[in-house]
Amino acid sequence: MTSSLSMFLRLSALLLLQCFTLAASAQKAADGYTLVWHDEFDTDGPLNPADWTYEQGFVRNEEDQWYQPENAFCKDGLLVIEARREHCPNPQYGQARGWRNREFIEYTSASVNTRDRHTWTYGRFEVSARIPAYTGCWPAIWTLGQNDRGIYGWPNNGEIDLMEYYQVAGKPCILANACWGGKRTKYNGTWSTTRTPYTHFLEKDAQWGEQFHVWRMDWTEESISLYLDDELLNYVPLANTENPKTDFFPVEGYNPFRHPHYLLLNLALGGTNGGPLDDTPFPCRYEIDYVRVYQ
């Protein structure tokens, strides 16, 4: 009797799962999208090198962390990007320039991306993640234009931020942005930015920060729409995102959001936007449940 009941429960659970899967597939079909690439992070250990690569060292924005592959790993169905307080010699000391030329590494973290593995032009992007909402932490989900060499470097190659979290004027915010060329000075982009106070989400649910949430981008030939749990945070018409022709960008009519982009996931610390790290609990984790791309 117990064996029959157990079998019945297993079959019922399987049928229920199939119903949910079919419903989800039907919804995607109704929206006109098909899943073209995904990573569910179901295998413990390092990321699949066929899908992901790593940034290394002190990279940008005068950030405090040293990026290294060891701080990104898959565990229990999640991609974990772990920021740690560490003290070790900087192997680039004496060779690097400016702010990168620090004698010691005090913090480590990871930044992973699909550059030279996977790129997309248009589609629906969904990332389920739980972010470390601490002062000093700067987690992000973003894309960069694959065509980023020579005059097509940032910001002319385009940047889309599905999510950034950091302090703005001392208040934690979640940002949704797009950036492209548009200024008459080099490395100075034009931004479409929204900054939603973190309290906006806590007012909905006091436990919001302990849960996973879905960041979504719907990117079409006409626009970029950025959502958090189906709430629209930013809408960017592509009619407005064409790079102007300048002395340092002598290209007419180039729109970076009509060209392939690759995906980045990273946890930065401090720097120009992250804020002070005095009260940041270490180690701290940025956890990603899945990444899915539909077209």
Image: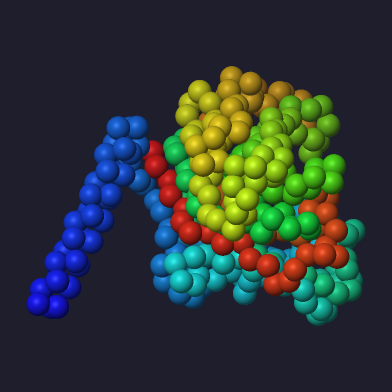
Residue found at the far front of this picture: 1
| Res 53 visible | no
Locate residue 170, reporting x and y percent.
Answer: 84, 46
The answer to whether 9 is drawn above or below residue 174 in the figure is below
Instruction: In the rendered view, tell whether residue 131 sits above or below residue 153.
Output: below
Q: Residue at x 31, y 44 (%)?
A: 24
Image position of 98 (left or right of 146): right
Does the rendering let one see residue 232? yes
- Residue 98: x and y in percent read 90, 58
Residue drawn at x 60%, y 27% is 236
As rendered, which of 227 and 36 lies closer to the eye? 227
Relative placement, left or right, of 11 versus 171 is left
The residue shown at (43%, 46%) is: 293
Q: In the image, 87: left or right of 6?
A: right
> Looking at the figure, which quarter contains the N terminus?
bottom left
Q: Quadrant of residue 195?
A: top right
Q: Position of residue 118 (x, y in %)?
A: 47, 51
Q: Quick one: which residue is furthest to the top in this view? A: 239
Looking at the image, residue 39 lies above or below residue 66: above
Location of the C terminus by quadrant is: top left
Query: At which x and y percent is residue 287?
Result: 56, 62
* Relative depth, front residue between 54 and 150: 54
Residue lying at 49% horizontally and 75% vertically, measured from the top left: 45
Q: Nearer the viewer, residue 23 or 256?
A: 23
Is 82 displayed left or right of 23 in the figure? right
